[in-house]
């Protein structure tokens, strides 16, 4: 049986998961790939650290010992970050190696350069693990749904925020309180910015939307809003409106351009994504032929992410056997304009407090009417004080229209406070 | 651009869907495959019939005009049935053509012969469309989850029965009544046997489980029970037990053998499959590395099934470009024993009517105790007559144990009737 040797760049959560899977399922993996696959070397910072699943692996702190090793067929980059990961991957491809990476940060910025280099050298660069952990959403878009013109991709692709919002929903707790618990449980980082501000989801969405629409979308193209302002009151009102609040990563092909945005949204409870809770991820894809599809699973973790990496390795080994490396290529053959936020058309949920006096609601309604916005539903509950808390849900309108109404509201003396403005997502309700 | 010509065997629902997709998305499909793909010929019975999406296609009633045409690169079999479909596919492979088929009936019986022939001639035989329409579950198992040892596959893979059970659940209606409506709407065939008796799901499960466990599972290996005995009362009791009733296709690797069964089952409402309703399908797969995953979408229809066929075609064309046809192969490298029904271990729901007299419940409980079966829950409701309707839900036991208890019950003078016995499925509740 042919021998295939792997060089791992990094041996943290994902790297050790890859090693564990190769050790746990050697018979299946070798038979499915017609090869004997093993990790030869792993690049680490600290050579003295004890590591699990390290049997037979030679550890090194010198990248060239992997990148220049002619016996290493496949380089697996699981170190994260932009540099030196980018240079290492480029060097590996230039040395004729196929590459697997789980690095969403890198791909969301330098994906084009990396994929073009892979193409230039006729090598596979696979990255299933970069989005939604073990869920094979990249292969679905790049290989299994290729008959389709994809109109939208909507994902719950950040486990940390989904855990936080799920716990807030189920237990009626505050954002800060649940975030602290998530940090203690290891579901959130000590600096949670990338997760709670939506940056992590935006990186993954840049990758997914590039593939789905065959056009280059970079991290900076994504409109991003995080979940820090979501309160238990918003979640409660959403529930009364038969909705849940989720951090959604939304990519839509609008014909005249594509919308790429990450933000919290009210989602109808009947939507297939609404029941995706805790650390689970899911991606909902609509194609013109296939209709609605959804892909669900664990979005992070050593073994789920390792599953994606090792399955990519097996695919690469099969391609090596057929001398068919580098066949899929970059796939960005379009150059679609990216729509600005002020052209997004969505419904809005607006929660505000006004003086409970005659004519106040009429005035408020007039501000929206003047901006050309009509309402889908309104909730006002009796309150003890001399204030009225009102929730307005608008029909779809442009962000520019909403801003006009909010500006009028902002200078209105009877307005006490605008608590929150959250978009609605109703795409795909059947 | 290279020209790739398709020969269609059949031009019914799926065949015309394939033609429609190729006509609707030519730019994307050609760019993604680096080829100009078109249907050259289609085999039909009636040459005089007017057909949609037939521009540029030459229709013939002679199979050899397709099978012997050296310009045809890929043969797409969408005629259904065992013969002559089997002979045509074998002939196409022998003539060096790659093949796509949507034919579950054929694969569930002759899959081994067909895949071995493809292997022998170094050709691709792809069949994504044979299970769950547009959902890319075959590619997920054969390509994207190959790092895993798969422990279970549970599917809702028959749209007709799922439509019927969903309507019975939502509207409290009878099986016969909903079936008739489904027939009028075209969701059920005039002879609904294959669907409602679970045979269609069994054929698809034979294919899925062969791939998931890398062992040959044929249609006749599948334990099958249909949904004709499910009543609105059962669905109502299931709901009180926080469950729904679904026709499940279940494949589990039990270590000492594999369990392959299709039957109605009580499924907890919180299970990811529980919300899959109407004509939607979903397949839930558990792997040792990836954990729980689920794949959701439309399981039938011209365009969803056509999506799977055309995506297979594109994959084949990419493989042809790389001279990498026939790389995946059959994959049945194990020979796992198939477990007999009497070794299945599941919980059971039993609905029965007994005389409402002292000692009756004690006697009944004793029958189960003697068979070593204990209860998870019991529902008994007051009824006007001198009879008691009782629902027993057992802890998991072997079918042999259940049969012993039911035999004792059967000869008990106070038993009026056993309405129904339905299995429980609780795998994967997190």
Image (cartoon, coloured by chain):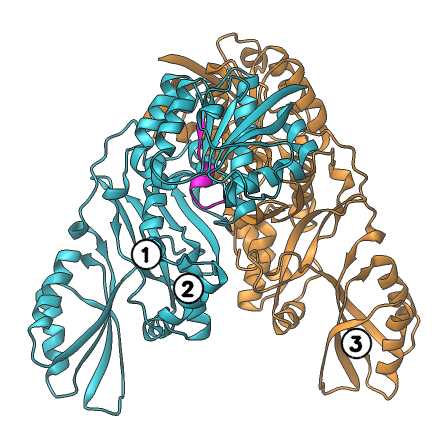
Chain colours: A cyan, B orange
Q: Chain of mark 2?
A: A
Residue that numbered label 2 is attached to: A164
Identify whether B348 is placed above or below A117: below
Quadrant of the rendering where the N terminus of chain A is positioned: top right
Residue that numbered label 3 is attached to: B353
Percent position of residue B302, x then y: 48, 37
The region drawn magenta spans A125-133
Residue that numbered label 1 is attached to: A193
Q: Is residue B273 visible?
A: yes
Residue at 23% across, 43% down: A221
Rounded to the nearest angstrom, the CA distance separating label 1 from label 2 is: 13 Å
B132 relative position to B416: left or right: left
Foreground: disc 2 or disc 3: 2
Are the residues flagged by discs 3 and 1 in contact, CB closer than 8 Å? no
Rounded to the nearest angstrom, the CA distance separating label 2 from label 3 is: 48 Å
Residue at 92% across, 74% down: B412
């Amino acid at each position: 049986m042919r021998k295939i040797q792997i060089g791992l760049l990094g041996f943290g959560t994902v790297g050790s998961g890859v090693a564990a899977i190769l050790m746990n399922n050697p018979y299946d993996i070798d038979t499915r790939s017609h090869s004997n696959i093993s990790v030869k070397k792993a690049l680490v910072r600290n050579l003295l650290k004890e590591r699990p699943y390290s049997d037979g692996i030679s550890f090194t702190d010198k990248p060239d010992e992997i990148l220049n090793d002619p016996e290493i067929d496949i380089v697996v980059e699981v170190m994260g970050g932009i540099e030196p990961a980018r240079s290492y991957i480029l060097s590996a491809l230039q040395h004729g190696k196929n590459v697997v990476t789980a690095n969403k940060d890198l791909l969301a910025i330098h994906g084009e350069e990396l994929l073009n280099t892979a193409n230039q050298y006729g090598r596979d660069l696979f990255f299933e693990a970069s989005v939604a952990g073990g869920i094979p959403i990249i292969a679905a878009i790049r290989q299994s749904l290729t008959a389709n013109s994809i109109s939208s991709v909507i994902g719950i692709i950040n486990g940390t925020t989904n855990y936080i919002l799920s716990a807030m929903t189920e237990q009626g707790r505050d954002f800060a309180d649940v975030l602290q618990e998530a940090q203690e449980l290891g579901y959130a980082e000590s600096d949670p910015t990338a997760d709670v501000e939506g940056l992590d989801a935006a990186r993954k969405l840049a990758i997914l939307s590039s593939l789905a629409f065959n056009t280059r979308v970079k991290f900076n193209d994504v409109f991003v809003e995080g979940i820090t302002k979501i309160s238990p009151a918003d979640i409660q009102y959403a529930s009364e409106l038969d909705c849940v609040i989720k951090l959604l990563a939304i990519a839509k092909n609008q014909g005249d351009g594509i919308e790429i945005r990450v933000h919290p949204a009210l989602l109808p409870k009947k939507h297939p994504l609404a029941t995706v809770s805790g650390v689970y991820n899911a991606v909902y894809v609509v194609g013109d032929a296939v209709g609605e599809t959804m892909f669900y699973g664990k979005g992070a973790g050593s073994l789920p992410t390792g599953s994606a990496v090792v399955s990519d390795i097996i695919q690469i080994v099969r391609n090596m056997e057929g001398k068919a490396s580098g066949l899929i290529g970059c796939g960005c053959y379009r150059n679609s304009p990216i729509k600005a936020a002020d052209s997004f058309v969505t419904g809005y949920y607006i929660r505000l407090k006004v003086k409970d006096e005659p004519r106040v609601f009429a005035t408020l309604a007039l501000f929206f009417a003047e901006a050309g916005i009509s309402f889908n539903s309104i909730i006002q509950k009796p309150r003890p004080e001399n204030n009225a808390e009102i929730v307005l849900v608008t029909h779809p309108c442009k962000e520019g229209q909403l801003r006009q109404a909010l500006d009028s509201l902002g200078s209105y003396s009877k307005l006490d406070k605008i608590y929150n403005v959250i978009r609605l997502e109703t795409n795909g309700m059947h």
